[in-house]
Amino acid sequence: MYADKTLTCKECGGEFIFTAGEQEFYAERGFVNEPQRCKGCRDARKNGSRPEREMFTATCAACGCEAKVPFRPREDRPVYCSDCFAKQREESSY
């Protein structure tokens, strides 16, 4: 029913195979367009679209160690390092 097709990646210009199995998968999912990019370019595009996460340095409220957190610490809220945060979660789940 389906046969492998050779397509050209619109990103890098390289050729890639759109296999019969992939075509069948696309048809089952209701996708009407063929892929425009090779797997390498799709993966790079997927991973590259996420901006680098800004990390902030804070002092752990429990042990006093330095902690890196993905949010800007506020003076009115405690910040915990990974280990102390895990301990806090364990204690609060009981």
Image (spheres, grey):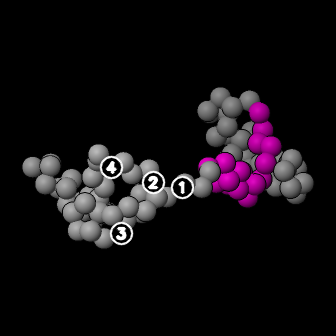
Counting from the top left corner in percent of width and height, residue 14 is at 88, 57
In the picture provided, is 45 more to the left or to the right than 74? right
Q: Residue furthest left?
A: 94
Residue in view at x 54 percent, y 55 percent = 54
Nearer the camera: disc 3 or disc 2: 3
Say few, some or many: other residues with alpha carbon within 10 Å of mark 2 (under 14 / 14 to 19 / 20 or more). Answer: few
Residue in view at x 77 percent, y 33 percent = 33
Residue range of the region highlighted in magenta in the rendering: 33-50
- Spatial separation of the CA atoms under disc 4 and disc 3: 15 Å
Question: Which amino acid, mark 3?
Answer: Glu
Residue in view at x 23 percent, y 68 percent = 63
Say few, some or many: other residues with alpha carbon within 10 Å of mark 3 (under 14 / 14 to 19 / 20 or more). Answer: few
- Spatial separation of the CA atoms under disc 3 and disc 2: 14 Å
Question: Which amino acid, mark 1?
Answer: Glu
Residue in view at x 67 percent, y 37 percent = 26
Question: Which amino acid, mark 2?
Answer: Pro
Q: Which residue is mark 2?
A: 70
* Residue 51 is inside the magenta segment: no
Q: Are marks 4 and 3 in contact (CB under 8 Å)?
A: no
Q: Which residue is mark 4?
A: 75
Of the image marks 1 and 4, the number of the one nearer the N terminus: 1
Pick whichever, 25 or 60, lies toward us: 60
Counting from the top left corner in percent of width and height, residue 62 is at 21, 63
Q: Which residue is mark 1?
A: 54
In terms of secondary structure, where does tag 1 sit?
loop
Say few, some or many: other residues with alpha carbon within 10 Å of mark 4 (under 14 / 14 to 19 / 20 or more). Answer: few
Nearer the camera: disc 1 or disc 4: 4
Q: Are marks 3 and 1 in contact (CB under 8 Å)?
A: no
- Spatial separation of the CA atoms under disc 1 and disc 2: 6 Å
